[in-house]
């Protein structure tokens, strides 16, 4: 019997290099997000980049109540309160002001 596992590609993924992230545009977006200058409402992508998780993870957390979403417009786009995101990061709104000093 032959070992077929070697003919299948590896399922492990390697993280994107800085150069690859620059090509996708996400690197620059992640660099623009600063905990000290967050808008009051954040998009799924902004929260995902800030927390370094997948946008799908953010949506799942919303469904489970871990990170409640605000639905806007007729499409039902999600927005997340800055305070809720900072709470997940272990920061309070007051901590944000201390981080500036």
Image (tube, helix red, strand yellow):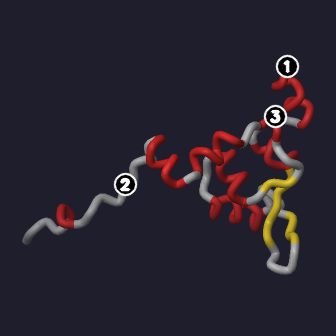
Q: Nearer the viewer, mark 3 or mark 2?
A: 3
Report which residue position mark 1 lands on. Answer: 101
| Quadrant holding the N terminus | bottom left
Give the residue displayed 45% in from the left and 48% down from the top.
20
Q: Earlier in the sequence, mark 1 or mark 3?
A: 3
Instruction: Find numbered disc 3 in the image and state the secondary structure of the residue it sits on.
Output: helix
Instruction: Give the left or right position of residue 63, taking residue 98 as reference.
Output: left
Q: Earlier in the sequence, mark 3 or mark 2?
A: 2
Report which residue position mark 3 lands on. Answer: 36
Crowding at dot 2, Cα within 10 Å, few <14 / some 14-19 / many 20+, comes out as: few
| Outermost residue, right side | 94
Q: Nearer the viewer, mark 1 or mark 2?
A: 1
| Outermost residue, bottom side | 74
Along the line of sight, which residue is nearer the eye, 4 or 32?
A: 32
Give the residue displayed 30% in from the left and 58% down from the top.
10
Instruction: Find numbered disc 1 in the image and state the secondary structure of the residue it sits on.
Output: loop
Q: Tell me where residue 66 appears, x and y as whole percent.
A: 77, 56
| Quadrant holding the C terminus | top right
Q: Earlier in the sequence, mark 1 or mark 2?
A: 2
Report which residue position mark 2 lands on. Answer: 12
């Amino acid at each position: 019997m032959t070992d077929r596992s070697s003919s299948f590609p590896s399922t492990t993924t390697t993280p994107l290099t800085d150069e690859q992230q620059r090509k996708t545009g996400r690197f620059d977006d992640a660099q623009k997000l600063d905990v000290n200058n967050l808008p009051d409402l954040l998009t799924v992508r902004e929260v995902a980049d800030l927390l370094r998780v997948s946008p799908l993870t953010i949506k799942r957390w919303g469904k489970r109540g871990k990170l409640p979403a605000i639905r806007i417009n007729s499409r039902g786009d999600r927005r997340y309160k800055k305070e809720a995101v900072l709470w997940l990061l272990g920061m309070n709104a007051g901590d944000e002001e201390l981080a500036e000093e």
